[in-house]
Amino acid sequence: MSKNKFIVVFFIICSLQISCGFQLRKPISLNYESYSIIGDSSPISKNIKKQFSYGNITEEKGGNGELVIEILENNFNKRILSLAGNGQVGEFELIQTVSYRIKTKDKWSNERKLEAIREYTYDPALYNAAAAEESILKDSMVEQISRSIITEINNLDK
């Protein structure tokens, strides 16, 4: 009897999961066979390359790809957002700005800018924790910007 209960519960869980609209993330499907990224070798371009590799789009060196992404500017700034009463830093703001343009069918797009902003509280007594938090925030900014570039490329054909 317990085996039958297990089967029933299993099918109920499966049907609930299917009915909720859950889908695994699929690799990107672009209408390009090859790509090139020029002007940058930062984590943003590495993340874009990783996404393209999931979609089986090959990389061409030297800007010879069917799709060319030129990173014109990639700036990271860290500035003080607030000070505590004793004059020590209380909060930092991290700003990542990327300017780029895209070439498809031998035509360059206009320059585009993306910006990601994060804030975090800083406590000098917890320096290691603050450094770890800053690193995680930088990674999330890179992920956000690279995902935005991929989404824009995906929407170019539509």
Image: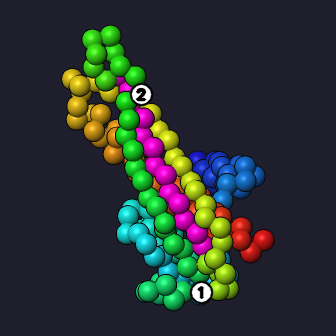
In three-dimensional space, the C-alpha distance between marks 1 and 2, rounded to whole angstroms, equals: 43 Å
**Side of 97 where 25 appears, left or right:** right
Residue 30, percent across and down? 65, 77
Residue 49, percent across and down? 46, 73
Among the 4 quarters of the image, the one containing residue 47: bottom left
Q: Read off the magenta span.
A: 90-102
Among the 4 quarters of the image, the one containing residue 29: bottom right
Seen at 74% across and 75% down, the residue is 157
Residue closest to the far right: 158
The foreground one among 41 and 15 is 41
- Which badge, 1 or 2, is on the more N-terminal residue? 1
The answer to whether residue 20 is visible is yes
Seen at 47% across and 38% down, the residue is 118
Residue 147, percent across and down? 56, 59
The foreground one among 28 and 69 is 69
**Side of 12 where 69 appears, left or right:** left
Amino acid type shown at disc 1: Glu
Dominant secondary structure of the residues highlighted in magenta in the image: strand
For the C terminus, the image quarter is bottom right
The answer to whether residue 58 is visible is no
User: Is 101 in the magenta?
Assistant: yes
Dot 2 alpha-carbon crowd within 10 angstroms: few under 14, some 14 to 19, many 20 or more: some
User: Is 41 in the magenta?
Assistant: no
Provide the residue designation for mark 1.
66
- Numbered disc 2: secondary structure: strand
Amino acid type shown at disc 2: Leu
Provide the residue designation for mark 2.
81
- Numbered disc 1: secondary structure: loop
